Image (cartoon, coloured by chain):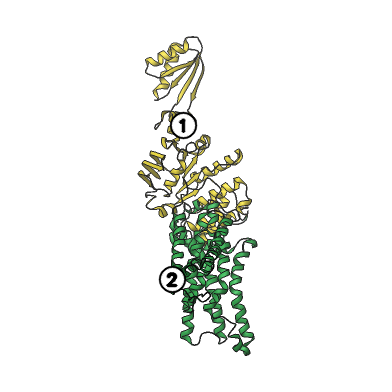
Amino acid sequence: MSPRRAPGGGDIVAADGRARILEAGYRPYAGPRLGPRHAVATLARHSFERIMGLKRPARYKVLPFLSVAIAYLPAITFVGIVAIISRARAQAIEFIPQPGRYYGFITAAIILFTVVAAPEALCPDRRTRFLGVYLASPLTKSTYLLAKAIAIVTALLLVTIGPSLLLLIGLALQNFGPRGEVAFFETFGQILLTGVALSLMFGALSLAIPSLTDRRAFASAGSLLLILGSGAVSGILTRGLHASQRFELLALNRLPFDLALRIFTLHGIQFEDRPPLPTASVVAASVGVTVIAAAVAWWRVVGVEVQR
Amino acid sequence: MPPVVRAVDVTKHWGSTLALSGATFSIHAGVTGLLGANGAGKTTLLGLILGLHRPDGGALDVLGHNPWEQGPEVRARLGYAPEHDAFPPDVAAHDVVRHLAELHGLPRREATGRASDALWEVGLGEERFRPVGTMSTGQRQRVKLAQAIVHDPDLVLLDEPTNGLDPGQRSDMLALIHHVGADLGMHVVLSSHLLEEVEQVSDAVVILDAGRVVADRGMAELHNVGNEIVLDVDGESAAADVVARLDARGVAAESPAPGRVVVRVDRPEVHDAIRDVLADGQFSLRRLQRRTASLEDVYLASSEAGGQA
């Protein structure tokens, strides 16, 4: 039997310092007991680790880290190109995107993350019935959902804020970014706002669809179907059938990029000779998607009966 | 010492199904068996104690709190081991137990140390870094017990903790449960549908039948229910004669078979009456044996009576 530390502290040492008890055994706990906030933070950290495949075999790390790689690789490449071809900056201007247009490159990463990694946050708890154990702790259904939302949104922030920030700072260091401090910090704020908005939207979707099933595969398929299917339906309606352009707001694969463009005060997505949709419509649609998805997750998780 | 759990006329419906009907009982210190057939309302009662469900009627008090209104505070002081396997199979037992300790409020450093201690305590010290999914049923049941006690709760709720165990494993698990209640200073509620295991480790029992509490007694008190003495006497009419003489002294007795007398011991003086009857009548006594009702007798009698025993 290997030596054990005494619970709640170090080994038990006699007053004269010469004797030391290594095998103290199970003893009553008299240390601090932290409250429900600690429980939320604990579950959020644990869920984040599960989502990212941390402390798990390598096969669980592949897809989350692939999502992150897809998001960061273009930014690293662009910064590298600017560094290498500094003499030809004039030509590079046409090629290197500013942070506002970078979201077109990371939409795939966000969708991949939502489809394959995020279901890990909710589905296994229901499938293994661990949810019942969680709810026998100081967590409530509401704080359980809050912890899961924090974990998913935090993971999404890695791909929605990190790459754009990297691009902004990388380009700024090469004297290729926004001109002046004001412009720099304005872009910085826009990146934060866009990252938070997209993380909330896709975080809500990442909770809503997996809350409908306890199987990860079904949740992934459902997420993919919803995001890509909505884009296809929207495309058929607006371009195939020439219906109102407002149906473009249904496209969950294009809406986040369009929202990012608006936050950076750029022209929105434009098809053929039609004018872009009003910014208010894009913002309202984004808020609507987020609220509806959050409501579905709330209804499914908070309304679930754990045991009878 | 106030009861650990006190229920007064607690009622709970699931739709049109009555899960608990006017349940009134108290759970005191030590190990208490929550006994009942499948569907008797045991799991519903555990859910109410945990504050996961709101009672439709009545009052429930757990460790001095209303569990529905003060759920997080109450659950911080409870440990719970579910009936079914509920842990992610790819996570090491130590990580599961540490995670649950942190959820119950222990700082990470303390949780790490106590997770090891709890797993050693249930006999899984050498196996604590193995993924739960690679463990045997008996080991997984021990992990469930370890995570229920890791944060040193005041009350531990164990839902069918011997499910799926072979007789040897069951005996070991019951010994562990007794150890938790007797040596670690935690109060334990052992939910089970198996009479013998409740009888083996419990200090008291609450018996549920179709949502009703049909018995709520200490085990010693329950054993006095149906406490009897069996006499075998020689002679064709001797048994009837003994019954008549006891009856004359106000002692309830019957002769269920030729030569056999069963005397109900409902007060200490009955022993003196038996001695005097046998001596005065000079009966030839072949056997005198005390017969104590088993928990099964009490359970069956309570269920048939349909009320509180």
Q: Is residue A42 visible to the viewer in this orientation of the structure?
A: no
Q: Is residue A96 visible?
A: yes
Amino acid type at circle 1 is Tyr
Where disc 1 sits, the SS reads helix
Q: Which residue bears the numbered disc 1?
A: B299
Q: Which residue occupies the foreground of this view, A230 or B257?
A: A230
- For disc 2, the chain is A
Q: Quadrant of the C terminus of chain B?
A: top left
**SS at circle 2:** helix
Image coordinates of residue B47 in percent, x first then y, are 44, 46
A146 vs A17, nearest the viewer: A146
Which mark is in front, 1 or 2? 2
Name which residue type carries label 2. Answer: Ser
Comparing A246 with A242, the one in front is: A242
User: In the picture, which chain is yellow?
Assistant: B
* Residue drawn at point x = 47 percent, y = 29 percent: B300
Label drawn at residue A281: 2
Q: Give the distance between the C-alpha atoms of the residues marked 1 and 2, in whole angstroms.
A: 68 Å
What chain is the green one?
A
Which corner quadrant of the image does residue A171 belong to?
Answer: bottom right
B97 shown above or below A240:
above
Residue density around tag 2, few if under 14, some if 14–19, many if 20 or more, within 10 Å: few
